[in-house]
Amino acid sequence: MVNFKSVMRHSGYLFGSKLLSRVIFTVFSLYAAVRLGPGLFGTLAFTLAMVELINSVGDVGLTRYGTRELVRHWNDRAVIGGEIMALQVGTSVVFGLAAAAVILAVGPGGGKTSVLLIGVVSVVAWGAVSATESLLVANESFLASALFSLLGKVLFAAAGAAAISAGLAVEYVLLAFLGAVLVEAAVRVAWTSASIARPSFSFSLKDLARMLRATAPFAVSALSSIAVLQAGTIILGILDDDEAVGIFSVAFSLFLPFMWAPVILARTMFPGLAGMYMKDRVAARMNSWQWYRLMAMAGIPVAALVSILAEPAMAYLPESYSHSADILAVLIWALPLTLLSAVELNILQITDREREGARINLMAAVVTIALDFILIPLIGPLGVALAILAGALLREAQIYFQVFRHFMKKHMYVLFLRPLAGGAVMLAVAFALRPHNPWAAAAAGAASYVVVMVVTGAVRPNEVRRLIRG
């Protein structure tokens, strides 16, 4: 499943679902931003960021470890599925209770306590959602995973928009989110139990403790990755105000759909790459090299295009969100870095070097959070965007060295020299034409990038054919 056709097909299921759900959610976010204003929208965005940060331990961390174990020991999927379910739900309860204790101790004013507590309850329900994802990914049931995710997002967007339209308080929007999570969790558990494996809880506490220890690097890596993106929103809400959070979150809502690409590609590539590595390490190395090439060529033009169009796109929103354009133009440059590190993190985890990946992600998160505390008092929401970009750059630099040293055995930087040159030409063309028509300038810039890639031979037909054949 690691060849181009399979990854694109399975990624297409997930990305199509995520793209559609993100489009729906982005429209909902923009609607909420306009109707609620920066202040109340900031409260909503702050709560959802907190929920995603806590959920990341299970959704990406334990899910990734569970997928690897299921691929390696598929005949024991019922027992492994039971262990994963117990850990997912158990850790969700523990983290949810810890978050609730902090919220009650701090006692944020302005009605935020009840909003945050509703968000915490959804964390517990999300444990069941995350538990099923390992089975779905290991079984390559990506279409089912995509449909379940889409169901949850559509339910939340519809119910949340109805609550906002009716003039209800933000608490009701969070109740809509909680209801959507509960429905998605119930459908997922029922389907995976009937179609893949009914979780068996016939394992010992010793086995569960062993799995808990083994998942720690994955959980740390996942939490750190999400912290690079989401911690800034929370820190911004603490150091500044809800209005600043709202201004940042509008840009972040438009940025987030692009960041689903590396997450989805990494998830769909992982089981196939893990299986290939077990059979033929040379083939796994060659395959990873080609995926690295594709990520380098894809991320740079998208980042350039979005940075060019950020200002004219934001002009359609109320004047209170005018500063969101600069934030989006900075944020989007984390995309090409994250696309590269997604391939590299897969490599570290299939080669049992997940601890190096966890250490790198943790260091990037620490630096990002430190920069948040330094930059937010100086330049406000734009500081969060710069901190995210710096964290992504630091993570890519470190993980690149580990992959070069332990797996590739040759430098990969040559693969993004031509895309960088193409990106520079693209920006030069676009900014030269931008005063006349920014949309036409973006199109001309994109065309110039394609020309540079063709002229410089960045894409080699024989290598692409090998990637497609797997």
Image: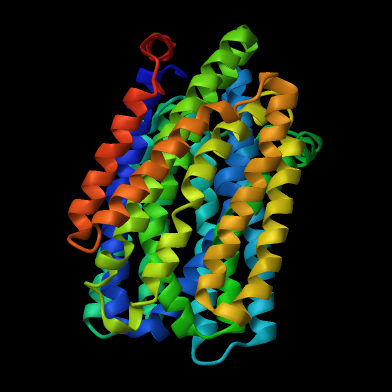
Above or below, 123 relative to 35:
above
Residue beneath the point at 63% across and 88% down: 107
**Which residue is outermost to the bottom?**
110
Residue 123: quarter of image: bottom right
Q: Residue furthest right?
A: 206
Q: Position of residue 412 (x, y in %)?
A: 60, 26
Quarter of the image with the N terminus is top left
Residue situated in front as seen by the camera: 203 or 157: 157
How far across and down, in percent of the image, does residue 70 sit? Answer: 59, 25
Q: Where is residue 8 shown, x and y percent of the image?
A: 35, 26
Against 102, residue 190 (above or below) is: above
Q: Name the foreground residue: 413 vs 21.
A: 413
Q: Quadrant of the C terminus?
A: top left
Q: Is residue 86 visible?
A: no
Q: Is residue 58 left or right of residue 458?
A: right
What colour scheme was applied to this rendering of the protein?
A: rainbow
Q: Nearer the viewer, residue 296 or 6?
A: 296
Residue 264: give x, y in percent of width and height. 44, 38
Labels in figure, total: 0
Q: Which residue is at a point 59% across and 48% down the rendered structure image?
A: 58
**Is residue 221 positioned above or below 439 on the image?**
above
Which residue is pictured at 42% across the width and 9% down the height? 466
User: Is residue 216 toward the left or the right of residue 236 in the image?
Assistant: right
- Which of these two is toward me, 428 or 128? 428
- For this view, does 350 lie left or right of residue 437? right
Occupied quadrant, residue 84? top right
Whether 137 is drawn above or below 93: the answer is: above
In the rendered structure, the answer to whether residue 212 lies left or right of residue 143 reads right
> Does the image show residue 124?
yes
The residue located at (42%, 44%) in the rendering is 424
